[in-house]
Image (cartoon, grey):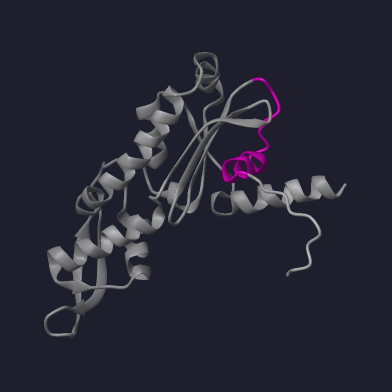
Amino acid sequence: KAGARKVEFLEHAVACGIAARLRLDEPVASMVMDVGAATTDIAVMALGGVVTEASIAVGGGDFDAAVRTLCERSFDLVIDLAAAEDIKRAIGTAWPGDEAKAEVRGRDASSGVPRTVVLSSSEVATVLDNHVEDIVEAAVRCITSSPPDLANDLLSRGLHLAGGGGLLDGFAKRLATATGIPVHRADDPTRAAVLGAARCLRALAE
């Protein structure tokens, strides 16, 4: 209906790998993770194809929802997802360190009047932890199910992290610690898949 004469499908993780300028056609493994709003896509690639992959229904949107639920259950405060995302960006972390605090404004669930509460980074980290751990475990499974020679390649090439959810403070460190491989964040993580697809489209048009 859009008038396209030909349609080519591109793996999400492959698009991110192209955006990162990885040589996916080489007989050496590359690994990409894209933490999107609703899903996280992970793939180990070599020789132009996907060797092992994983996709789980956990993403940055789940981080925001967890912060929102924290406010409702612990403080009887109703906030929207935009406010929850602001808190996540301000003090959310996957690797707790120095304690930080931030104010969040919302509506009192009982009286309906505006109210402000103060959240700590440790409180936010606690509600994010299960979602972060789900993603980390999926990455570990993807690596351990890869052929041993390709898994060894990742020790030098590392994992390339894309997607807005991957911007969570301490997330890259959490991944690197759990997988034992270095983690490199994309230059433009929120647009990595789109930029990779555009680069692929230009190559097809030439």
Residue 144 vs 100, above or below: the answer is: above
Q: Does the magenta segment cover residue 127?
A: no
Look at 23% across and 52% down and name the residue there.
127
The image position of residue 64, as x and y in percent, is: 34, 60
Residue 166 vs 54, above or below: the answer is: below
Left or right of 160, for residue 2:
right
Left or right of 192, for residue 86:
left
The image position of residue 106, as x and y in percent, is: 25, 76
Q: How many marks?
A: 0
The image position of residue 122, as x and y in percent, is: 21, 49
Of 119 and 72, nearer the camera is 72
Q: Quadrant of residue 149?
A: top right
Look at 79% across and 67% down and name the residue there.
3
Q: Does the magenta segment cover residue 17?
A: yes
Q: Quadrant of residue 134?
A: top left
Left or right of 162, for residue 134:
left
Look at 25% across and 67% down and name the residue there.
103
Of 183 and 24, nearer the camera is 24
Outermost residue, right side: 206
Q: In this rendering, does residue 174 appear at all?
A: no
Q: In this rendering, does residue 61 appear at all?
A: yes
Left or right of 178, for residue 18:
right
Q: Which residues are magenta?
A: 11-27
Outermost residue, top side: 149
Q: Quadrant of the N terminus?
A: bottom right
The image position of residue 2, as x and y in percent, is: 74, 69
